Image (cartoon, rainbow, N blue to C red):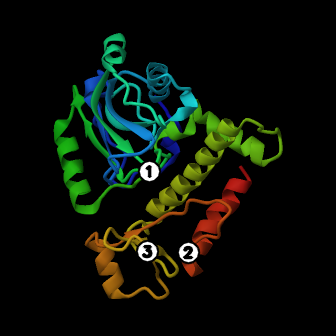
């Protein structure tokens, strides 16, 4: 079955192994990591949930009812997959109110467990997390040895960090809409739709640049003007001149080459890297 992702390049070649994923919600486990401690006091009631086969926004609406507030008073750091078992925090704005009892909420929603509660002085906002940990079960593999070999390659060289097809909507519809909007074919007044289309467009361009670097064998080769990042220094660094030591740090995984998240701000890249990225932009303009 073809998907919107089929147009992007494979770093290790297209796999020949077939199997099944996400057969059951338990086959895909996601655990959120906010990366910070709560204040212990404040206007915001923090609720850590584990949901199975439920949509984040549905749980938000139901939790709002249980807490006696409107849905807009409940916020999150990130939306999580429905067909999965996921753990995440939600924040409920409850100034001057006691912590609500949630046992009835759990009883009415067997797909949702309340794991922990706390108080904090700030609400959660989208992006307020360090990341997510994932556990994926593969079923009925016809060539398990190929999967084992690819995992060995990934451990040694990493994997292209593409945005997945979920970001682009059903059959890439969000990208199609974003293109039409960008070409002034229609107006988008709904803020949530504008956000979806912008996110899809930026993610699509990121994937296009990444795919092109795989295609021309520069995904692990530093270009002049590349923007590199590392866990040790989140500020990043601009490569004015490519040196052996910089390339060695990339080869060893101490530094990572980035692709752009395009928007109103200027690209952080310069020289050869920026020229490469802008060539991809020009190609997209003619789509």
Residue 270 sits in quarter: bottom right
Between tags 2 and 3, which lies in front? 3
Apparent side of residue 204 relative to residue 230 in the rendered image (left or right): right
Q: Are marks 1 and 3 in contact (CB under 8 Å)?
A: no
Quick check: can you spot residue 19?
no
Residues at marks 2 and 3, CA–CA distance in whole angstroms = 11 Å
Quick check: can you spot residue 193?
yes
Q: Which residue is mark 2?
A: 269
Q: Nearer the viewer, residue 265 or 221?
A: 265
Residues at marks 1 and 2, CA–CA distance in whole angstroms = 26 Å
Residue 51 locus on image (x, y percent) = 33, 26
Residue 103 locus on image (x, y percent) = 30, 17
Residue 214 sits in quarter: bottom left
Q: Nearer the viewer, residue 90 or 54?
A: 90
The crowding category of the residue bearing disc 1, from other C-alpha atoms within 10 Å (few below 14, some 14 to 19, many at least 20), is some
| Furthest-top residue in this view | 108
Q: Are marks 1 and 2 in contact (CB under 8 Å)?
A: no
Q: Which residue is mark 3?
A: 236
Q: Secondary structure at mark 1?
A: loop
Q: Please tell me the numbered disc located at residue 128.
A: 1
Which of disc 3 and disc 1 is earlier in sequence? 1
């Amino acid at each position: 079955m073809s998907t919107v992702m089929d147009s992007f390049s494979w770093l290790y070649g297209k796999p020949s192994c077939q199997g099944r994923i996400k057969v059951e919600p338990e086959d895909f486990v996601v655990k959120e990591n906010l990366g910070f401690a709560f204040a212990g006091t404040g206007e915001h009631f923090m609720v850590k949930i584990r949901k199975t086969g439920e949509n984040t926004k549905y749980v938000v609406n139901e939790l709002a009812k249980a807490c006696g507030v409107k849905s807009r008073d409940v916020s999150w750091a990130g939306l999580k997959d429905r067909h999965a078992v996921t753990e995440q925090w939600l924040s409920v704005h409850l100034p001057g109110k006691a912590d609500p009892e949630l046992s009835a909420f759990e009883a009415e929603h067997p797909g949702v467990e309340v794991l922990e509660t706390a108080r904090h002085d700030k609400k959660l906002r989208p992006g307020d997390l360090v990341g997510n940990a994932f556990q994926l079960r593969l079923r009925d593999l016809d060539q398990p040895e190929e999967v084992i070999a690819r995992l060995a390659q990934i451990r040694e060289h990493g994997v292209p960090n593409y945005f997945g097809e979920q970001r682009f909507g059903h059959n890439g519809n969000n990208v199609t809409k974003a293109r039409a909007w960008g070409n002034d074919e229609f107006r988008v007044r709904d803020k949530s739709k504008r956000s979806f289309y912008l996110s899809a467009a930026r993610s699509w361009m990121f994937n296009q640049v990444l795919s092109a670097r795989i295609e021309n064998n520069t995904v692990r080769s530093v270009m002049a003007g590349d923007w590199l990042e590392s866990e040790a220094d989140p500020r990043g660094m601009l490569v004015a001149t490519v040196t052996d030591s910089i390339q060695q740090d990339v080869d060893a995984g101490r530094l990572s080459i980035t692709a752009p998240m395009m928007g109103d701000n200027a690209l952080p890249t310069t020289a050869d890297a920026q020229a490469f990225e802008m060539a991809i932009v020009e190609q997209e303009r003619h789509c």
